[in-house]
Image (spheres, helix red, strand yellow):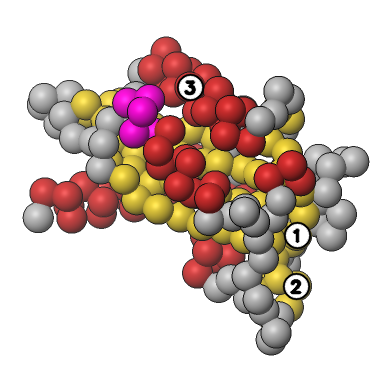
Amino acid sequence: MKFKIGFILIGVLLIIYSCKSQNIENNENYIQGIDDNYIRKKFFKDSLNLIAPIIQLRYENDNHEIYSISKDVKIINEMTTTILKIELNKTKIHKTELNSYNKKEKNRVLEKVIHEKSLHPNWIMKAPSQILIPNEKYTLLVEIYGIYGNRNMGQISFAIINNIKETIEIVDKEKFSFNPKNKELMRELISKGISRLIDN
């Protein structure tokens, strides 16, 4: 019951982040069609380039007060970036117009598009211009949302963007129930997520 309530709270937090974020290109139609012959793709590891991850975390103290600790979020962001570079054997990471750990810069259109693509894999979804990287065919964007401290739970998403077609190819999401500052558990979670995307 405790975990169920916690995940409901995470859902509420996602809505709050969305409402507080920038309204970017909100009038555009990002659903470009439906692929009736959809087959889930796999990608060669070498073909995936990295976008700076988006980290949205809140600390909960023993009095159930929830707030942001910027130094913790920055540490988790740097840890996640390092894990991603190691997992994909990359040294370069692309920065976007979205600040990776500042909720005021969060693109609510991006969140909506990623959510819709995760629910409807066969929808052809346009990628918001803020995450497109010229001269790279495929890029991987990882987002982490959650609570840590008195309770530890959250959700991670993996989105592959096709920068040539300007579409989001795949979105995978997975919930977790550990402190995101735990490097080993986070590494295992990211490794598992990437393994579902790549062609071995």
77 within the magenta span? no
Residue under circle 3? 79
Q: In the figure, 147 relative to 19: above or below? A: above
Q: Horizontal and vertical percent for residue 157?
A: 49, 49
- Mark 3 or 2 closer to N-term? 2
Q: What is the C-alpha distance between the residues marked 1 and 3?
A: 28 Å
**Residue 66 visible to an observer of this rendering:** no
Query: In the rendered structure, which segment of residues is drawn in magenta?
Result: 182-186
Q: In the figure, 200 relative to 74: above or below? A: below
- Of tags 3 and 2, which is closer to the observer? 3
Amino acid type at image mark 2 = Gln
Q: What is the C-alpha distance between the residues marked 2 and 1?
A: 9 Å
Residue drawn 67% across the image and 66% down it = 41
Give the position of the C terminus as an image quadrant. bottom right
Residue under circle 1? 167
Q: Is residue 32 left or right of residue 123?
A: right
Label 1: how many residues lie within 10 Å, few (<14), some (14-19) or many (20+)?
Answer: many
Q: Which SS does the magenta portion mostly show? A: helix
- Of tags 1 and 3, which is closer to the observer? 3
User: Which residue is nearer to you in this view: 48 or 200?
Assistant: 200
Label 3: how many residues lie within 10 Å, few (<14), some (14-19) or many (20+)?
Answer: some
Residue furthest to the top in view is: 71
SS state under label 3: helix
Amino acid type at image mark 1 = Thr
Q: Are marks 2 and 1 in contact (CB under 8 Å)?
A: yes
Q: Give the total of numbered labels.
A: 3
Q: Are marks 3 and 2 in contact (CB under 8 Å)?
A: no
SS state under label 1: strand
